[in-house]
Amino acid sequence: MNQLFQKANQNPSKIAIIDKNGSYTFSQLLSKTQQIAQHILAGETDLKEARVAFMVSPGFDYVATQWAIWQAGGIAVPLCISYPFPSLKYVLDDTAATFILAGEEYLQVLDPVRADESIHFFQLSDFSSPIESSSLPEIEPSRGAMILYTSGTTNLPKGVLTTHENIESQISTLIKAWEWSESDHTVGILPLHHVHGIINVLSCALWSGASLNFLYPFDAERLFELFEEGEVNVFMAVPTIYFKLISSFESFPKERQNQISKILAKFRLMVSGSAALPVTVMEQWHQISGHYLLERYGMTEIGMAISNPYAAERRAGHIGQALPGVEIRLVDESNNTVPIGEPGEIQVKGPGVFKEYWGKPEATQKTFTSDGWFKTGDIAQLNGGYYKILGRDSIDIIKSGGYKISALEIEEILRTHLLIKDCAVVGIPNPEWGELVVAALVTETELDSKELTAWLKELMPPYKIPRIFIQLEELPRNAMGKVTKNELKKHFTT
């Protein structure tokens, strides 16, 4: 990650990070990074890719800890700060982490592993004292840098190992595509155990010399206040955050709404990702901000691979075009390239693609083709040069009555109903149809399923219309806002 640190050295006096404790320059960040690195090395010359798990709240200390692990030669394993201990232990055991670094607020949840003599356990206060400095190791780009875990919406999470070279490619590609510069100022509100928060926001901002303001925990009112201060010009979030911001905005007096809209209109870039962006949310945000959100496509295993263009047309409901240096192809079930306009699985090649699933050689081999393409499992089609996601083959493509039906397409139509706030469509096993199309709705008021079916008949073919509707107060979601559809299916089978 040498280029990331070199960039920081070029702007020593510039503000790099703002959090609840204050503002910090790049020089302060590098100094704290080296101090932590020396502490965890404890006289050794190189951690030699030891897995270093860390549980630190978003802010200056998080970044310094992550950078220190890289500078000391370790593999960073960020732990989700909202997970219960059994989920944390799964990651610790799976990575065989020999170091744990923790903020004081997480000592209690991690207490069961503090007595483990095979683990070097540090709390942040251990790094406050000066330590004799020695040279840090030279890190080859091919060495392991980070293990992030897949969302686990369909099975147990897998550890995704990326190298320093992979991460540098992911960052530099986005900086070029989205035109990051040192004059940018952005906000960090996304979880920092996920590629969206770590790469797209944190790393791109600091690599380019921009300033990053951490807002933790998320608070819609405080975020709007931050916008109103007039410094922020780049903003990235997931669809559920935009939905919350729209709801909050609608509660403001008209005068404040107008003032906020004028400020948002001056932003350079607004991005949505990590889950499908409903067209209705895109249109509502455009009315508020004057911006069509830039929607993109990525995964833990590949970083970002496809994006709507920064300076050209952004198509609602589409994820865009291949990013520079990334190869994309769509294939059928026999791994043959499909004709333009036909649905196929997205496969990816490029220097940003991960090295392996940690400790799972068979899973790694299965997810790559014999000629080196990564199989995403996501189904898309190419329309007029833009890719459109139809869903995940295992969860969003419903095979019913001989048809392959996109759950995302049905969800998009359902969300246009005035009384439907949110929805999710899944397929459940059925002896007659193979899978039955069903829908869970979050609504303003009770809906009559017959009336809803009649309304849908005007908008889609009969075979796509859900046969069962249930109404929930909220949909089950993971930390990144993705609906956990396997959990949702249980509502239809109990």
Image (spheres, grey):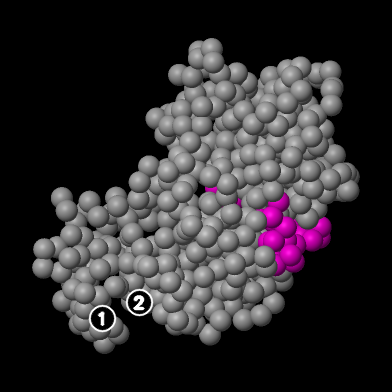
> Camera-side residue: 223 or 434?
434
Look at label 1 and name its amino acid: Leu
Helix, strand or loop at disc 2? helix
Query: Percent from the top left, x then y, of residue 419?
Result: 32, 72
Is any atom of residue 64 visible in this view?
no
Identify which residue is drawn at 69% across, 61% down.
173
The tally of labels here is: 2
* Residue located 28% across and 63% down the image: 426
Residue 156 located left or right of residue 452:
right
The image's mark for residue 413 is: 2
Over which residues does the magenta segment extend?
Answer: 168-197
List the residue tagged with mark 1.
456
Q: Position of residue 346 (x, y in %)?
A: 47, 66
Q: Nearer the viewer, residue 170 or 229?
A: 170
Give the CA distance from mark 1 to mark 2. Answer: 8 Å
Q: Is residue 127 left or right of residue 421?
A: right
Q: Is residue 431 visible?
A: yes
* Residue under the image location 52 percent in, 60 percent down: 371
Asked if the residue at tag 2 contacts the one at tag 1, i.e. Cβ–Cβ closer than 8 Å, the answer is yes
